[in-house]
């Protein structure tokens, strides 16, 4: 069957009747154009001028924008020093008065604008807000001789669907274009008090339910390491801006892979914490009241250190439970980086649903060899009931019969993106479940959690290592399978998507003869595997996932430091 | 309107068609009789002989069984010493070898049998199991010179619906009479490892959804301080056995008041912790997969010390998350008993739904005066949107259209208890909600949680003091209103139901002339208020609730020690 036929075969459960309405949508077009114009106007001509060619041309060439940034010295040496500083150095230099918040901020703002010029990662720049906050921080520091808080001067980027006071918050639903947030979200308020600077809100797909970025506001975001490819999603812009270095930490959200996929594809690290550690109060989504598989907010960054520091201060100093009783009152524990020889890691090489592509296979092999060489005990792990897990979570997403997504979409009649049609057909599509059926899904989920938890405990497994996706960054609008990330959402096990330092190599990463004789286990697998053609994924980052038991977030982060920093010696701040 | 008419007026949403079926039920009768016979046979003749009259006669006389226990010296001085020892003394004496686990256990077993003879609190005695475990503990101690764990020798009673390996677990559904648990629940396993001794499983109502005890297995449980009255529910047997001193700690569960009501009515203390601190994995209920208002397990005891010690060891030494990934990995924090002058407590005197009866009013007045005298800052608090909260939680209970409760009940065709009919008519009765509607309920709940949390934070309120019910222990099968307890379930705020040391006094606790001119705000209020006739509630314990913010369990327990032990000087271990 052709890829198109396979795709069409999936679209059988939701008929999209009443969704698209060109007449209704027409009314929104001027507002959308104004929105895009504000974004375009925010990017100065000297930034746009750094592009060697039109972006469309760069995309065809699989252009590496990160490489170009360094080679062509698009920043001054001082700007590189600010924006490539380890997070603790950056905060310490501002806290000691050696660097000002304003100078540091300006370097990040410039790098963020560059990131956007190449990858289309931003939805909205608030550069004046950022500058004003930086000036206030410097003034406070000058007057009091101390910082306002532990994140004094930290440049943080925000996924757009997080409320930002006085600004449109739309979650990529066109019908929300007049929705001005009355208050900033809890996370924005809390991080602001700790000293963070906000200056950019980033791209995400229509419905927030693609591991990709298409929407009717600003369109696709691209992988900075290969502009032909997707930056992932749904925290699409965060993936690109963080990987490019336009912010120190980005805040994404994840209900099926939406932090981990963009981190993996774009070239940074991303933590999907256990639910309820980071507040999600104050934001737009179509999943209000849905608690079978809760969304989670979490940090993305170029270093595990930045992720750890952000989690620690967010929780211990921010005390989200003072603003949001949904947030668990669990302090962030200081956990030492473990010794390799004390660790047992179980490896998933195949989840039984979709075979991984050659670069991911190579990444897994090399990382496992290095872990073994360092003394880590490795177990091979065939994860049980992944089909049940994936079917169940897909039903959970849509079991309101697409009521809320449908309401938001139908209101504007906006055109449906290709992957919106894909996600509206998850599970039983537009079938409205009743409460008894929903409770059955929850019981299935709880049994899966028990079974996986028992596996960890019974085998003294500390972590599971797995692919973050069956491929490296795919082509835009061709991300069909969520099974590798979504498994950890239904289990609610904290998971770090981390860079291995390896990149796709068209020579090395080819399908073998044995691969070519493979019999696909499903249409989905065929669709995904056929999308991998070695020549089209040049230099795409190779990332994996590390997963711990529920609430073992601190251990996952500490072990990620061991693996990324010490064993793999990946340093994304050096280029 | 008469009470009967008011009751009937409520029963309009569920028609009970297909529930009761005398023919089907007939098949279960021999098994039920055998079940009751095993229970009756477990009680030795010398225990039954201690009753001065038939229980039916004692009930008419509003007999005080606790008073009688001490006055008539139903236990030996040594047995009183064991069973009235403070928990730390008891554990220390066993741990030092001064007391054996067997001697201690035998005293509790005898007191538990007495409790049952007077109040009908037990469903099942496992006295041989208890003795065997006590002997094993002594043997271990003798061999190793140390205890097996921090709860070595602690007699613990269990609500019946908690799985106990090899024993019937039915949750008072007759259709479950052949359901033999293959494994003990997580809590039983975990506490067993820490050294707890189990020997009795206790009564609960049909469906678990009465704040009372009627069922087709063993019938009603009575308040030990006044045998005419209800022991409360749904942890009905735990209320009576703990208040009578037949165990040191009892494990109950609470989804609308089911720990706090029986503790309040029966004469002990009971903590409803925040959800997910105590595992509920391994048990029978009709609410599997229901997570809009999750059930919670928690301890009941005659001292706050016992509750605190149990929580601390259960969580910190038991590590429930190793068995059950649903359980939050939040260690129990050591929190100092606060100083009265550092506390701000907001008082709810009326929840806007059902006026409290005279003894509760007196209890509130006296406790507030003592708190003020001790230096506590008191705020008057009119809780917002209690009508919305109560309507919403009632819908959450039944929004599966009574599917699961109905399935369990219809299978045996068992007769429906009066209050089963009452609870099946909660919310929208047998209306099956769809998922979108359920998500709306969840959003309403989350908004309420935010509003109440904001009240605490904005006003620097540490705790809320409120009635545990609009009355003292009511007559059996006349518990209609859950609003005072259920408020804290929908908010998921940890709440201690505690004894004030005061008892109902027919002379003091009368309706005033002003009361008699009161205009009822609802049928429910009329029904509840008209049930309070001063002469029929002689000596009923007067209890209140103390509530903290979500996850502030440790603070609630520490403040309860201040209030109960230091300010009110209530000592239920002395009589």
Image (cartoon, coloured by chain):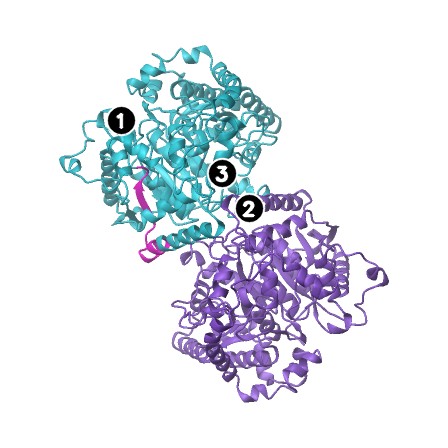
Chain colours: A cyan, B purple
Q: Position of residue B281 (x, y in %)?
A: 45, 60
Identify the mark at residue B442; answer none if there is no mark.
2
Reply above or below: A67 against B276.
above
CA gap, disc 1 and disc 2 = 44 Å
The residue stretch that appears in magenta:
A453-469
CA gap, disc 3 and disc 1 = 37 Å
Q: Position of residue A285 (x, y in %)?
A: 50, 35
Mark 3 = which residue? A403
Left or right: residue B252 compared with residue A336: right
Q: Quadrant of residue B9?
A: bottom right
Identify the mark at residue B154; answer none if there is no mark.
none
Q: Nearer the viewer, residue B308 or B227?
A: B227
Reply above or below: A571 against B460.
above
Q: Residue at horizontal 45%, vertical 61%?
A: B318
Reply above or below: A143 against B130.
above
Mark 1 = which residue? A537
Q: Residues within 10 Å of mark 1 (few under 14, many from 20)?
A: many
| Residue extending farthest right | B513
Q: Nearer the viewer, residue B462 or A539?
A: A539
Chain ID at mark 3: A
Does any portion of residue B567 appear in the rendered image?
Answer: no
Left or right: residue B178 compared with residue B53: left
Chain ID at mark 1: A
Which one is in front in this view, the residue at disc 3 or the one at disc 1? 3
CA gap, disc 3 and disc 2 = 15 Å
Q: Residue at horizontal 41%, vertical 34%?
A: A15
| Residue extending farthest left | A513
For the residues beneath circles 3 and 2, the answer to whether they share a chain is no
């Amino acid at each position: 069957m052709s890829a198109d036929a396979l795709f069409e075969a999936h679209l059988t459960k939701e008929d999209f009747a009443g969704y698209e309405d060109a007449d209704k949508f027409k009314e929104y077009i001027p507002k959308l154009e104004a929105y895009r114009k504000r974004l375009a106007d925010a990017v100065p001509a000297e930034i746009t001028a750094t592009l060697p060619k039109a972006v469309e041309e760069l995309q065809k060439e699989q252009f590496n924008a990160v490489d170009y940034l360094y080679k062509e010295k698009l920043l001054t040496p001082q700007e590189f020093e600010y924006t490539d500083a380890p997070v603790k150095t950056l905060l310490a230099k501002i806290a000691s008065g050696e660097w000002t918040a304003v100078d540091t901020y300006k370097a990040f703002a410039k790098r963020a604008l560059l990131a956007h010029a190449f990858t289309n990662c931003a939805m909205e720049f608030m550069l004046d807000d950022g500058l004003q906050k930086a000036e206030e921080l410097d003034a406070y520091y000058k007057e009091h001789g101390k910082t306002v808080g532990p994140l004094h001067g930290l440049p943080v980027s925000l996924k757009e669907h997080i409320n930002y006071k006085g600004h449109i918050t739309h979650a990529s639903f066109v019908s929300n274009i007049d929705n001005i947030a009355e208050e900033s979200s809890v996370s924005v308020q809390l991080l602001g008090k700790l000293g963070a600077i906000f200056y950019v809100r980033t791209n995400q797909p229509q419905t927030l339910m693609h591991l990709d970025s298409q929407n009717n506001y600003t369109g696709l975001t691209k992988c900075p390491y290969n502009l032909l490819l997707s930056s992932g999603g749904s925290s699409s812009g965060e993936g690109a801006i963080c990987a490019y270095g336009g912010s120190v930490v980005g805040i994404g959200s994840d209900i099926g892979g939406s932090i981990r996929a963009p981190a993996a594809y774009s070239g940074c690290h991303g933590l999907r914490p256990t639910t309820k550690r980071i507040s999600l109060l104050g934001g737009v989504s179509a999943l209000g009241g849905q608690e079978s598989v809760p969304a989670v907010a979490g940090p993305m960054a170029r270093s595990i250190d930045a992720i750890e520091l952000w989690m620690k201060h967010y929780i211990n100093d921010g005390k989200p439970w003072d603003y949001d009783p949904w947030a668990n009152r669990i302090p962030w524990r200081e956990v030492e980086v473990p010794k390799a020889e004390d660790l047992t890691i179980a490896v998933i090489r195949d989840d039984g649903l979709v075979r991984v592509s050659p670069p991911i296979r190579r990444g897994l092999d090399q990382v496992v060899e290095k872990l073994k060489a360092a003394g880590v005990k490795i177990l091979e792990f065939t994860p049980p009931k992944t089909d049940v897990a994936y079917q169940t979570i897909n039903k959970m997403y849509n079991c309101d019969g697409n009521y809320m997504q449908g309401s938001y979409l139908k209101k504007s009649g906006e055109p449906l993106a290709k992957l919106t049609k894909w996600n509206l057909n998850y599970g039983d599509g537009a079938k409205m479940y009743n409460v008894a059926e929903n409770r059955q899904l929850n019981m299935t989920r709880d049994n899966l959690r028990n079974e996986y938890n028992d596996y960890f405990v019974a085998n003294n497994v500390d972590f599971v290592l797995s692919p973050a996706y069956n491929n490296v960054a795919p082509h835009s609008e061709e991300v069909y399978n969520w099974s590798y990330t979504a498994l950890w959402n239904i289990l609610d096990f904290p998971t770090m998507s981390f860079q291995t330092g390896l990149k796709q190599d068209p020579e090395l990463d080819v399908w073998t003869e044995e691969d070519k004789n493979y019999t696909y286990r499903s249409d989905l697998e065929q669709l995904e595997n056929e999308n991998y053609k070695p020549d089209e994924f040049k230099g795409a980052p190779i990332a994996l996932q590390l997963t711990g038991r529920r609430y073992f977030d601190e251990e996952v982060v500490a072990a990620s430091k061991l693996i990324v920093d010490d064993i793999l010696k990946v340093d994304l701040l050096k280029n």
